[in-house]
Amino acid sequence: MYEVIVGYIVGSIAAVILFRHVVREHIVKATLDMLINEEYVRAYQDDDGITQLYTWRESVDLDVWEQLEGIIEEMGSEKKINDLMDEMEKEIEDDQDDTP
């Protein structure tokens, strides 16, 4: 009789531990997938095939963000941005080697 009770208790404890592990793994995987889909966290595979995660805020320094905000405020209008893009495209076209 005691063997049945001990078996039931040990089985229940094992089931709870396994259930907690599976649920935690599922929650973490679902959360990371959601963050990647929302593009808050980015992922890439390094040379060893390991998936590396980083947030987009980590990839750019705070000083660079401040400079970028200043540039955007300085540009002001969309026309100015389009003019700048056209100018950059012309520079790229001019840099191409035309020699036969």
Image: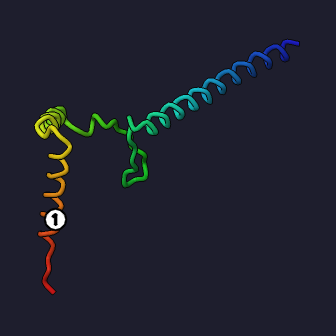
Residue sitting at x 18%, y 54%: 85
**Image coords of residue 66 (percent x, y):** 15, 32
Indicate whether 7 appears above or below 46: above
Few, some or many residues within 10 Å of mark 1 (<14, 14–19, 20+): few
Indicate whether 84 appears above or below 17: below
Q: Which residue extends farthest bottom?
A: 100
Residue 40 relative to residue 93: left or right = right
**Image coords of residue 98 (percent x, y):** 14, 80
Residue sitting at x 71%, y 24%: 15
Residue 59 relative to residue 19: left or right = left
Residue sitting at x 14%, y 77%: 97
Disc 1 marks which residue? 92
How many numbered markers are drawn?
A: 1
Q: Which residue extends farthest right?
A: 1
Q: Quadrant of residue 18?
A: top right
Indicate whether 91 appears above or below 40: below
- Kind of residue at badge 1: Ile
What's the image's color scheme? rainbow
Element marked by disc 1: helix
Is 33 or 13 nearer to us in this picture? 33
Residue 87 relative to residue 44: left or right = left
Residue sitting at x 15%, y 72%: 96
In which quadrant will I find the C terminus? bottom left
In which quadrant will I find the N terminus? top right
Residue 78 relative to residue 21: left or right = left
**Image coords of residue 14 (percent x, y):** 69, 23
**Image coords of residue 78 (percent x, y):** 20, 43
Is 99 or 87 nearer to us in this picture? 87
